Amino acid sequence: HTFTPTFTHFGHGHTFETMLPIIRRNVLVFLLAVVTTSAFVIPTIRQPLTPLRDASNFGAPASTPILDTVSSPDDLKGMSMRDLKQLSHELRWDVINSVSKTGGHLGSSLGVVEMTVALHHVFSAPEDKIIWDVSHQCYPHKILTGRRKGMEQLRQMGGLSGFCKMKESNYDAMGAGHSSTSISAAQGYSIAKSLLNKPRNNCIAVIGDGAITGGMAYEAMNSAGYLKNRMIVILNDNGQVSLPTGTPSAGGQVPASSLSATTSQILVSKPFQDFRSVAKGLSGLFPENIQEINKRIDEYARGIVSGGTLFEELGFYYVGPLDGHDLDNFVPILEKLRDSPSNKPVLLHVKTTKGYGYPPAEAASDCMHGVAKFDVATGVQVKPKNPVAPSLTSIFANELVGVAQEDRNVVGITAAMPGGTGMDIFGRRFPKRTFDVGIAEQHAVTMAAAMAAEGIKPFVCIYSTFMQRGYDQVVHDVAIQNLPVRMILDRAGLVGNDGPTHHGAYDLSYLGCIPNLVIMGPSDEIELKNMIRTAHSIDDSPSVVRYPRGTGYGEEKLKDLFGYDLKNGMPEKGEVLPIGKGRIVRSSSRTTAGRDGKVAILSFGTRLHESLVAANEIEEADSSVAVTVADARFMKPLDIDLVRSLAADHSAIVTVEENSIGGFGDSVLHFLSLEGLLDSGDLKFRPMVLPDAYFEAGPQYEQYENAGLNAKHIRGTVMRLMGKAVVPQLLDA
């Protein structure tokens, strides 16, 4: 660190340059002594309580008299500190009880209860803008802003979103679901208020220590500091950067963030706070030039201990750390920031405990981040009994472990989602070959590109929806240079209760137009294992495997519906597939049917199951129709020989996929058109894709029902195409 003094002489022959080494040495010695001593006298870690038998033993209130009086944030304005604390207690248990019935993001919401109460007590939303980054922690905010009753249908079809949503409430200043966007949004609101000469300009971004690892957060801070926009950024530091934090990886079992590792060391240290207070208190006893030295010592110490200087060098005034559960301290500081005339952006560093106030959450490795329905008395979640097959995520991860056992050059990369992508399974087996980069998809892709260029075989495991943020890097750093990066996109298609921000509805469209990519979509768990082996074998181009959220089908269904020969049981490992070659899964037994009575369903991905069900139902319902079902396997390169064959032998082709317009069906249609296979008019074609709409939270099956991609919809499309069903006609008005 380098000081830039406005004075140069200190008397007795000393200049600032000669004093600086002495200042630094004494500051470091004093800080070390204070911190070392404090470790023996002041506990700084909250120990989770031992779970008891029922919720009342956790301190759950028997009633909620204060919360019952709250219909909007205005009702918090006149509350005493005692009432605010009681409100926080009631609100916390209201969140627990609500989420226990619906499932959702619990731990993050419990960690910000006091913060939410303080923000709505001090600021005047919706005029004052409170923006929740990611917004999975917004349940207390929803309850305080008039949506308490709606929590009964949280994340259900037709109910409340699990995230902030502008069309749901004017108290939701910005919708979210992805991370690192809040600071940019707060800056935009601040600039707009200034340009419109609005008398109030309070814009608050609440961002976690995980989300702040995303590069967009630093882009926004750099801009806000430069433009001097009035805004408050609350850094909610709960020590859980990845989901779950603590997955074995090349960085150890600590949060995937250097910033988080640094701040967590001392920021909760009371002696450090006392040292700053003492230093400031003593400064008045010294001459003016010594006061300036003390000021700079304080700044230097903050940089050493907390990283505060990092934010200050970006143009923010750093305040903290604060205990985010201490309303006595938190509320007056927010009031001072609210009433400050300064236009300088402020970074308020707040320490919280994820899952705070609910012992089962505090004790859980992931702090009960995302939960199914659960028993409030124990925290035990309701899980499906005896699933017929493991999750596709675990099937992928275990297959990758098998590949890595055979090839030491295989590594796994994730962007703060080891649990969701299966990298936690891989990391437990190969910690030194597992790389969690934090919420930094762009960085993950480019890092993988360089690793591939050096001879490593990287598997970049990212949700489909989050790969959108690394799109330029896929083009610029991977595809143009034709580097063999293996991109594994979990959560392809519709994902269920997380809703539109998390659907993987676009990857075939945004990746299908990029040259050099090999794009695969498994139809079942056996094909998923095959495609992981296939991706590993591809060393001359980048490749993509995309698969949905959910479980496999199990051995019996794979034999009965899909036609697998599993006399020796499920295969232990996958097989390498021929690149760009699909397969016929079902040939009609009606060999005497002419071409005019034949239709082909060409599926890409896991809609193959629904396609096979539909084919059986069609032939049972109409003896004149013969249905072939094919599994494309590859979108790029497309199996053009298979498409030509289907076009030659069938009078109609229906493609089915879990993607928006512009994906697999469009690739097939493009080929048919360029080949002239549609010119004679004797081949009909229908693409079945996700409609041009956003699908709100709800069960996956219901979402696909609304999207028109279940078996009955495929059956209806085929029957209409073959002239076997009447299409309703719209009447003139």
Image: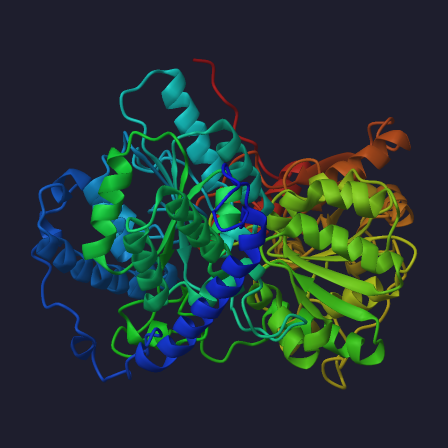
Q: Is residue 385 above or below residue 64?
A: below
Q: Taking 411 as reference, is 350 left or right? A: left
Residue 597 visible in image: no
Quarter-of-image position of residue 611: bottom right
What colour scheme does the image use? rainbow
| Residue at position x 67%, y 67% in the image | 561
Res. 269 image quadrant: bottom left
Q: Is residue 438 visible?
A: yes
As drawn, 17 above or below 355: above
Q: Quadrant of residue 557?
A: bottom right
Whether residue 596 sits left or right of residue 610 in the image: it is: right
- Please identify the residue farthest to the top as the structure is shown: 733
Would you place residue 239 above or below residue 378 in this image?
above
- Give coordinates of residue 151: x percent, y percent: 27, 52
Residue 548, how many percent across, how many down? 61, 58
**Drawn side of residue 564 relative to residue 454, left or right:** left
At a point 43% along the width and 68% down the height, the residue shown is: 30
Question: How many marks are shown on the rendered structure?
Answer: 0
**Which of the pair 79/578 is nearer the observer?**
79
Q: Position of residue 260 (x, y in %)?
A: 51, 61
Image quarter in which the C terminus is found? top left
Residue 493 in the image: state x and y as whole percent: 60, 50
Looking at the picture, tell me which residue is in the foreground, 690 or 467.
467
Looking at the picture, tell me which residue is in the foreground, 508 or 303: 303
